[in-house]
Image (cartoon, helix red, strand yellow):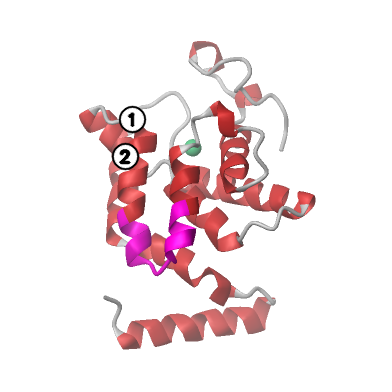
Amino acid sequence: MEAMGDREEKQSTAKSLKQESGINQMEMAHADAIAAHPLWRKSVVCITQLEASREFCRHDVTHFLDVARLAWIENLERGLGVSKEEIYAAALLHDIGRHLQYEKGIPHDEASVQLGGQILSDCGFSADAKKRILEAIGGHRNKDTKTRDDLCGLIYRADKGSRMCLLCQAEKACNWSEEKKNRHIR
Ligand SMILES: [Fe+2]
């Protein structure tokens, strides 16, 4: 449980951010809570350690935020009306179970749903939001979600679109299909 003093401090930081930049950080309070969650942070460190010598794409915070921002841009450009906080939550969590794939052989979409469910419950998301976010996390490797105009489709496309296959030294050895590989600047 978050202490009252911590919550007040976060709210006051969010308020001053809004005053300084015009950005309403209050809208993102739950997404901020994910990035402060000990299980999320521990998983990020574990993934970084396990991928230290990986030649293919890594699954770090830069990737998570690339996915969030690409999905948010598409959502704005196409007027899809998906919540910013749900987009950022799904992006921050979609690969968070990667270390369990490396360590225990659990497919990372499933592992991310497990860890994500726990984290979302602790971070104040509503039951409906949690359901939508977990569906997007669980479906981010399923090409059936590719053309959907909802959170699932946004996360699927942003995940693939975030990878710079056109500039990648390991592209020839990568097991991604030609269809998945991104050869465009986004
Ligand atoms: Fe990803």
Q: Position of residue 139 (x, y in %)?
A: 48, 37
Q: Which residue is mark 2?
A: 111
Q: Is mark 2 within 8 Å of ligand 1?
A: no
Q: Residue furthest front?
A: 128
Circle 1: residue type: Pro
Mark 2 lies on a secondary structure that is: helix
Q: Is mark 1 within 8 Å of ligand 1?
A: no
Does the rendering let one see residue 97? no
Q: Tell whether label 2 touches label 1 (CB within 8 Å).
A: yes
Q: Residue at x 65, y 73 (%)?
A: 23
Residue 2, relative to residue 34: is it above or below?
below
Q: Position of residue 42 (x, y in %)?
A: 27, 52
The residue stretch that appears in magenta: 118-131
Q: Where the C terminus falls, by quadrant?
A: top right
Q: Residue at x 48, y 56 (%)?
A: 89
Residue 16: within the magenta?
no
Q: Where the N terminus falls, by quadrant?
A: bottom left
The quadrant in which residue 99 appears is top left
Q: Position of residue 182 (x, y in %)?
A: 65, 26
Q: Which residue is mark 1?
A: 107
Residue 31 in the figure: left or right of residue 111:
right
Disc 2: CA contacts within 10 A as few (<14), some (14-19) or many (>=20): many
Q: Residue at x 47, y 63 (%)?
A: 31
Residue 49 in the figure: left or right of residue 11:
left
Residue 14, disc? none
Q: Could you tell me how many numbered marks the image carries?
A: 2
**How far apart are the two marked residues, 1 and 2, measured between alpha carbons?**
6 Å
The quadrant in which residue 27 appears is bottom right
